Image (cartoon, grey):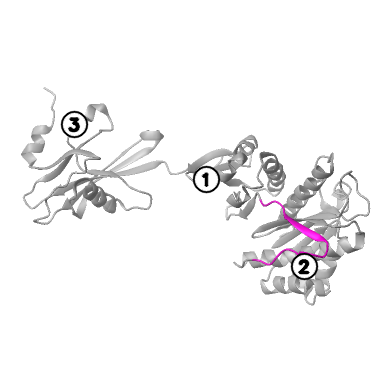
């Protein structure tokens, strides 16, 4: 069929395979793909199950969801069903991609308030994509063909996105069909360790709600558990913070937070402890033994010491490393910021590692030796950080040390 030319070509070009599970389209998607020359290279298997519960013998399990009570929950149940089915069957069949489709074409509908045809499409693969299509009418056959074309277009779009392209529209506007994003609260990518990386995009903020997120997450969790997935990593931007409470209610725990997002995790297997790595738990501080041509050492007096006991004490200049900063660069920066002195690294003097420091973190403190060239000893004290800074001889420093009587 001409409808399938692009999808078949994309599958062939990417050397990918696909499994298709349909309901409303009645097998038209499978028929279109299998009509393409060389279809045996990319089609694996598929099925038409018009009722999720009655289709259990074909699907191998009853994947049906709780009975919908109204038109809105009926549409939502189809979105959740296709999402879970595509994820589960992709892993069972071993196909690169799995497309699931389900909806209602008309002319009659189960629920009051549902007057026109619709279908939910979800494709699971190296990337995932879902759409909800609503028809402007309840004519059965035209809707079946329109939904089939949308399904084939969605295959093309997903493969293009996986190849790094921008993707084509999942279906053309017009023709009595409108398209809504479906499942866009969960951008999903499988990792190499049998887990799943999930992100709620900041762009979803205008449509996000705790109820919708909880519904989509619940459906996704069912599919991941059935597929034997292990570690789940969920990133929630601050714009969508309403998603955090439903995630915690579904067993996720905080991993870490940054100014723009919160990262949560969940370990699915119940018969083994979680090996998911903890967030960074050690800070690095650096102190500089800065020596001038006269053999004197640069000492500083902090304006506010970390502990009252050390107030007005003299110490080596230094500070904490910034993310991604080498400690040699840290000490050179800190010395210059605090005293205006530029020094070059000569070597490491000592290293100390302690635990349960600030915020329960470990603390690695590295002391390094730096040299100041002749003529570079002038000090400019940063009054925001220091009370004073001076060059001191060894004898002067030893005289400052308090000793027990």
Q: What residue do we see at 71% from left, 62% from top?
A: 97
Question: Magenta stretch containing residue 170, yes or no?
Answer: yes
Marker disc for residue 43 = 2
The answer to whether residue 27 is seen in the rendering is: no
Residue 319 place in picture, x, y as percent: 28, 43
Circle nearer the N terminus (3, 2) = 2
What is the spatial separation of the Cα atoms under label 3 and label 2, in whole angstroms? 76 Å
Marker disc for residue 405 = none
Marker disc for residue 312 = 3
Which segment is the magenta one?
167-184
Q: Is residue 116 above or below residue 222?
A: below
Q: Is residue 359 left or right of residue 231?
A: left
Figure quadrant of the N terminus: bottom right
Quarter-wise, where is residue 265 in the image?
A: top right
Q: Which residue is mark 1?
A: 261
Residue 136 place in picture, x, y as percent: 85, 57
Q: Is residue 17 above or below residue 330?
A: below
Main secondary-structure element of the magenta-colored stretch: loop
Figure quadrant of the C terminus: top left
Mark 2 Cα-neighbour bin, 10 Å: few <14, some 14–19, many ≥20: many
Mark 3 Cα-neighbour bin, 10 Å: few <14, some 14–19, many ≥20: some
Foreground pick, 208 / 29: 208
Residue 251 place in picture, x, y as percent: 62, 37
Foreground pick, 275 / 51: 51
What is the spatial separation of the Cα atoms under label 1 and label 2, in whole angstroms? 40 Å
Q: What residue do we see at 82% from left, 50% from top?
A: 60
Circle nearer the N terminus (1, 2) = 2
What is the spatial separation of the Cα atoms under label 1 and label 3, in whole angstroms? 39 Å
Foreground pick, 159 / 212: 212
Mark 3–mark 2 contact, CB under 8 Å?
no
């Amino acid at each position: 069929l001409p409808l399938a030319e692009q999808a078949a070509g994309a599958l062939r070009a990417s050397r990918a395979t696909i499994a298709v599970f349909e309901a409303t389209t009645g097998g038209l998607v499978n028929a279109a793909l299998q009509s393409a020359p060389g279809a045996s290279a990319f089609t694996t298997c598929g099925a038409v199950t018009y009722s999720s519960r009655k289709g259990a013998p074909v699907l191998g399990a009853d994947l049906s969801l709780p009975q919908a009570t109204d038109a809105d929950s009926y549409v939502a149940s189809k979105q959740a069903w296709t999402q879970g089915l595509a994820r589960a069957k992709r892993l069972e069949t071993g196909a690169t991609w799995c497309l699931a489709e389900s909806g209602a074409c008309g002319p009659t509908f189960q629920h009051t308030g549902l007057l026109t045809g619709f279908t939910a499409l979800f494709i699971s693969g190296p990337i995932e994509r879902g759409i909800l299509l609503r028809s402007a009418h309840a004519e059965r056959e035209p809707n079946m063909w329109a939904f089939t074309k949308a399904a084939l277009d969605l295959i093309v779009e997903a493969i293009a996105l996986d190849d790094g392209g921008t993707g084509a529209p999942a279906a053309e506007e017009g023709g009595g069909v409108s398209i809504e994003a479906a499942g866009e609260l969960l951008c999903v990518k499988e990792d190499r360790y049998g887990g799943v990386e999930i992100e709620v995009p900041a762009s979803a903020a205008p449509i996000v709600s705790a109820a919708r997120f909880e519904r989509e997450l619940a459906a996704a969790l069912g599919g991941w558990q059935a597929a034997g997935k292990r570690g789940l990593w969920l990133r929630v931007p601050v714009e969508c913070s309403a998603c955090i409470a439903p995630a915690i209610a579904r067993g996720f725990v905080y991993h870490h937070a940054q100014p723009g997002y919160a990262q949560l995790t969940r370990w699915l297997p119940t018969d083994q402890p979680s090996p998911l790595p903890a967030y960074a738990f050690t800070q690095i501080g650096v102190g500089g033994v800065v020596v001038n041509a006269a053999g004197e050492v640069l000492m500083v007096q902090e304006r506010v010491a970390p502990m009252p006991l050390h107030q007005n004490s003299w110490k080596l200049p230094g500070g904490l490393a910034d993310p991604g900063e080498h400690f040699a660069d840290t000490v050179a920066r800190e010395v210059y910021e605090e005293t205006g002195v530029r020094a070059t690294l000569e070597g490491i003097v000592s290293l100390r590692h302690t635990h349960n420091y600030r915020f329960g973190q470990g603390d690695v403190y590295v002391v390094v030796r730096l040299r100041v060239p002749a003529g570079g000893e002038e000090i400019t004290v940063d009054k925001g950080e220091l009370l004073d800074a001076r060059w001191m001889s060894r004898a002067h420093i030893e005289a400052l040390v308090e000793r027990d009587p």
